[in-house]
Image (cartoon, rainbow, N blue to C red):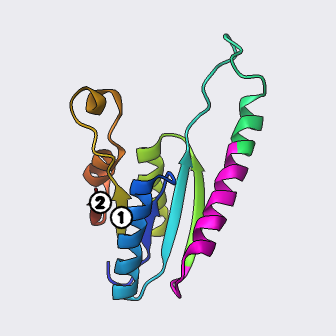
C-alpha cells in the first residue's frame, strides 16, 4: 500500500471533494501519486422508447468530454506537487471503481459516502459499501 498510487473516485460533489482532501493527505504522507476516477453511468432511454434525442454513443461522448473538462479544472485548482492521473470509465460505478483499482494495482481507495439512510439508502445503491466490500486493497470511506 505504501508504495502504490491512491485511487480517488469522484462524482464532483462536495462530499467527493472532501474525500479528495483525504486522498491528497494520504498521497503526501506516503509520497505516492494518485488517480482521480469518474464513472459515467449508462444513459437513460433505450431503442424502444426513444427517450434520447441523440444516440447513446453521442451522449456518452458528450458526457465524457464534460467529465474530462471537470477533471482538468479540479486538478488545476489543486495546489500540489502530487502526481495526479485521470481515468474516465463507463458503466456501473462500483464495478468500474473496483476494476480500475485492480488494473492500476491501487494501494488504497479513498471514496466519499453520501450517507443515505432509511428509504433513501434503499433507493440509492451505496457505491462506497460495494467498493469497500469488494476491494482487494484498503478503502477509506469519507463522510
Relative to 113, 31 lies left or right: right
Distance between mark 1 and mark 2 Cα atoms: 7 Å
User: Residue at (41%, 46%) from the top-left corner?
Assistant: 94
In the foreground, 34 or 136: 34
How packed mark 1 is, by other alpha carbons closer than 10 Å (few <14, some 14-19, many 20 or more), is many
Magenta stretch: includes residue 35: no
Mark whose residue sits in front, 1 or 2: 2
Element under disc 2: strand
Q: Is residue 102 visible?
A: no
Q: Is residue 141 visible?
A: yes
User: Which mark, by number, is residue 142?
Assistant: 2
Which of the 4 image quarters holds residue 55?
top right
Residue located farthest toward the top when viewing the structure as drawn: 48
User: Which mark, by number, is residue 110?
Assistant: 1
> Mark 1–mark 2 contact, CB under 8 Å?
yes
Answer with mark 1 or mark 2, whichever residue precedes in sequence. 1
How packed mark 2 is, by other alpha carbons closer than 10 Å (few <14, some 14-19, many 20 or more), is some
In the foreground, 99 or 65: 65
Q: Which residues are magenta?
A: 63-83
Relative to 41, 143 lies left or right: left
Q: Main secondary structure of the magenta part?
A: helix
Magenta stretch: includes residue 73: yes
Residue 125, position as x, y percentages in the image: 34, 35
Element under disc 1: strand
Residue located farthest toward the left when viewing the structure as drawn: 118
Amino acid at each position: 500500500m505504501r508504495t502504490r498510487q491512491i485511487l480517488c473516485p469522484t462524482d464532483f460533489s462536495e462530499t467527493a471533494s472532501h474525500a479528495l482532501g483525504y486522498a491528497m493527505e494520504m498521497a503526501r504522507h506516503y509520497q505516492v501519486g494518485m488517480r482521480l476516477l469518474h464513472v459515467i453511468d449508462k444513459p437513460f432511454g433505450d431503442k424502444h422508447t426513444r427517450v434520447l434525442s441523440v444516440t447513446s454513443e453521442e451522449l456518452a461522448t458528450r458526457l465524457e468530454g464534460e467529465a474530462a473538462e471537470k477533471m482538468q479544472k479540479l486538478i488545476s485548482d489543486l495546489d500540489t506537487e502530487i502526481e495526479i492521473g485521470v481515468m474516465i470509465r463507463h458503466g456501473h460505478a462500483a464495478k468500474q471503481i473496483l476494476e480500475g483499482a485492480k488494473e492500476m494495482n491501487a494501494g488504497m481507495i479513498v471514496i466519499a459516502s453520501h450517507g443515505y439512510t432509511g428509504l433513501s439508502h434503499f433507493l440509492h445503491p451505496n457505491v462506497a459499501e460495494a467498493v469497500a466490500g469488494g476491494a482487494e486493497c484498503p478503502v477509506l470511506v469519507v463522510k
